[in-house]
Amino acid sequence: AQSVTQLDSQVPVFEEAPVELRCNYSSSVSVYLFWYVQYPNQGLQLLLKYLSGSTLVESINGFEAEFNKSQTSFHLRKPSVLISDTAEYFCAVSERGSQGNLIFGKGTKLSVKP
Amino acid sequence: DAGVIQSPRHEVTEMGQEVTLRCKPISGHNSLFWYRQTMMRGLELLIYFNNNVPIDDSGMPEDRFSAKMPNASFSTLKIQPSEPRDSAVYFCASSPRASGGALGETQYFGPGTRLLVL
């Protein structure tokens, strides 16, 4: 069965510092991978996703994630964070061609301090 | 488009009362999902519908929970009777195609209903 592990529950960083949020998954078949972001008191919204092709995917606000099949990882990175990036970030996986749905990790709370 | 609409946004009720949460998916979307979010358990899928038909309700905690989707533009999640451990944020989400996660569809989440059962 598929599963997602986000190793860090909380990540505090200073503004303009780089950040990496880690995500590992397990699955016996090919997968799609997602990062969702949840701002305070809001629902989740898609940040970026990997379906196929280039293993490096980018969001419009400067985040990027790289699919690493050998390490079964999909870590999220940003070279210079903003105060407005403060949010909870969820990694999720779904299996190609199955009727199964998204499996979410427990989330990582990113706190950006001035 | 207004996005996924959920009501009420906040609900406070007493143990034993019936609670009904409502969701209007994005027009034209064919899959609808109900999730529950708590600090302890994170985000859990309760049930999802494809083309108004329940496909997988294995995440529904127990018989006190029920969900319906009478048409493509409306769904309800009912808890009867409610208990304090049901306190959580309940999210509804929709996606364009009736494929679950099989095609890598993006799910669009509503703002959630924050439920407190006293």
Image (cartoon, rainbow, N blue to C red):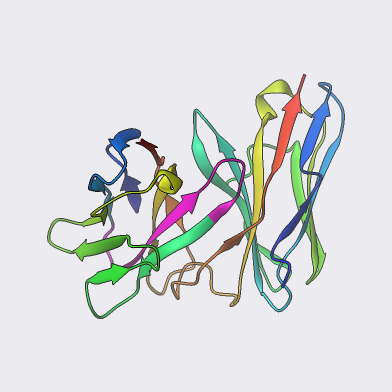
Residue A47 figure quarter:
bottom left
Residue A35 figure quarter:
bottom left
B101, above or below B19, in the image? below
x, y percent for residue A18:
22, 48
The magenta stretch spans residue B29: no
Residue reaching furthest right? Answer: B17
What residue is rendered at 25% in x and 46% in y?
A: A19
Magenta-highlighted residues: A27-44
Pick the residue in front: B104 or A14.
A14
Q: Quadrant of the C terminus of chain A?
A: top left
Can residue A48 be seen in this snapshot? yes
Pick the residue in front: B111 or A23.
B111
A87, above or below A11, in the image? below
x, y percent for residue B80:
82, 34
Q: How many marks?
A: 0
x, y percent for residue A43:
60, 50
B113 vs A59, left or right, is: right
x, y percent for residue B105:
49, 72
What residue is rendered at 28% in x and 46% in y?
A: A16
Pick the residue in front: B49 or A60.
A60
Residue reaching furthest front? Answer: A114
Residue B93 figure quarter:
bottom right
What residue is rendered at 37% in x and 67% in y?
A: A59
B39, above or below A69, in the image? above
